[in-house]
Amino acid sequence: MTGPFIRPRRLRQTPAMRRLVAETRLHPSQLVLPMFVADGIDEPRPISSMPGVVQHTVDSLRAAAHDAVDAGVGGLMLFGVPRAEDKDATGSAGDRPDGVLNRGLEALRADFGDETVLMADTCLDEFTDHGHCGVLTESGDVDNDATLRRYESLAVAQARAGAHVVGPSGMMDGQVAAIRDALDAEGFIDTTILAYTAKYASAFYGPFREAVDSSLVGDRRTYQQDPANRLESARELLADLEEGADMVMVKPAMSYLDIVRDVADRTDAPVAAYQVSGEYAMIAAAAERGWIDFDAAIDESVLSIARAGASIVLTYAAPEVARRLARR
Ligand code: PBG
């Protein structure tokens, strides 16, 4: 014997062999593109901390959505950015039918019908003047149950505007059950709930605050999860499934791949993971300095999120990743 008998490298010798034995295969339809639609702007506004990502007008939103769907992306997740003067304590611009998010949903549903999966962020933080995901008590705490009433109204407005999927991202207790009841009561029995099941209080949401012109002062640690905790996500998962979640989500993705794996192991429901603004920004910033190859790093990160157990990946790079996947 002159060398090792077992040679794992045999399976790595050609691109064709590597393709044959690949354990994780991504399809463009597994990717979801988060998009921002803003009120009171005449042309798309770049988000400086997220190169290549913009706040859209309704028209540019439609164009970008067509591009994403053409690329094979499986769904679109919409966030609304109201005018500053339309923000108030209860986030009323969120459930008004003429609120910018609902107008964006309506336009996209009219364009696409059922050709793509249209998702909406079901949360108040984009619409409140204090920037929190819920309404506040007099002492300034987030009022869980009063917030549920607002989420019910938001979800119904989004379903009415054309959302196939509502995505409650506020981490209030009982949000899935409340929204399910409200949707059913209005006849939206097929509107699907993508529950933000394990959403951590993360520094990686930094650029998103710019993306939605957030007014938040302070943090969200009384409602989003402590990054130290793992088992807590299993409890959140149980609650969401019992309350009627159709799909579940872990967020952020890259620093929480252990949680993605845990959740995937514990449920048969579709598991989504969200490569958030800060994850995208880190890669984009390093690439701008020539320190990292943007395409390769994004592709690898998305693949690793799928390998960890996500069957759906939300990423701001969805269209380009989808195009590269389709070429492979
Ligand atoms: C809340 C919401 C946030 C994100 C998605 N939904 C912000 C937050 O929780 O602070 C962050 C997404 C990202 O960073 O890309 N509506």
Image: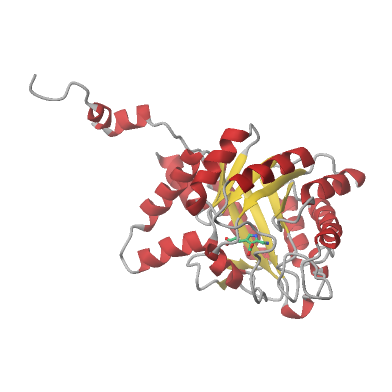
Image mark count: 0
Residue at x 58%, y 66% (from the top left corner): 208
How does the figure colour the protein chain or chains? secondary structure
Q: Position of residue 278 (x, y in %)?
A: 50, 63
Q: Residue 122, located in which quarter of the rendered image?
A: bottom right
Instruction: Judge from the rendering whether residue 19 lies leftward or rightward of residue 271; answer left or right.
Output: left
* Ligand 1 visible in quadrant: bottom right
Q: Height in image: 85 above or below 184?
A: below
Q: Height in image: 284 above or below 216?
A: above
Residue at x 81%, y 50% (from the top left corner): 159
Q: Position of residue 85 (x, y in %)?
A: 77, 80
Residue found farthest to the left: 2
Residue at x 53%, y 65% (from the top left corner): 203
Q: Where is residue 102 in the image (x, y as percent from the top left)?
A: 77, 60
Residue 311 visible, this orientation: no
Residue 6 visible, this orientation: yes
Residue found farthest to the top: 1
Residue found farthest to the bottom: 85
Q: Residue 290, located in which quarter of the rendered image?
A: bottom left
Front position in the image: 230 or 105: 230
Residue at x 83%, y 45% (from the top left corner): 180
Q: Can you say which quadrant of the picture contains the N terminus?
A: top left
Instruction: Judge from the rendering whether residue 104 lies leftward or rightward of residue 294; answer left or right.
Output: right
Instruction: Judge from the rendering whether residue 78 lies leftward or rightward of residue 25; answer left or right.
Output: right
Q: Height in image: 123 above or below 261?
A: below
Instruction: Judge from the rendering whether residue 173 lies leftward or rightward of residue 215; answer left or right.
Output: right
Q: Where is residue 119 in the image (x, y as percent from the top left)?
A: 69, 51
Q: Can you say which quadrant of the picture contains the C terminus?
A: top left
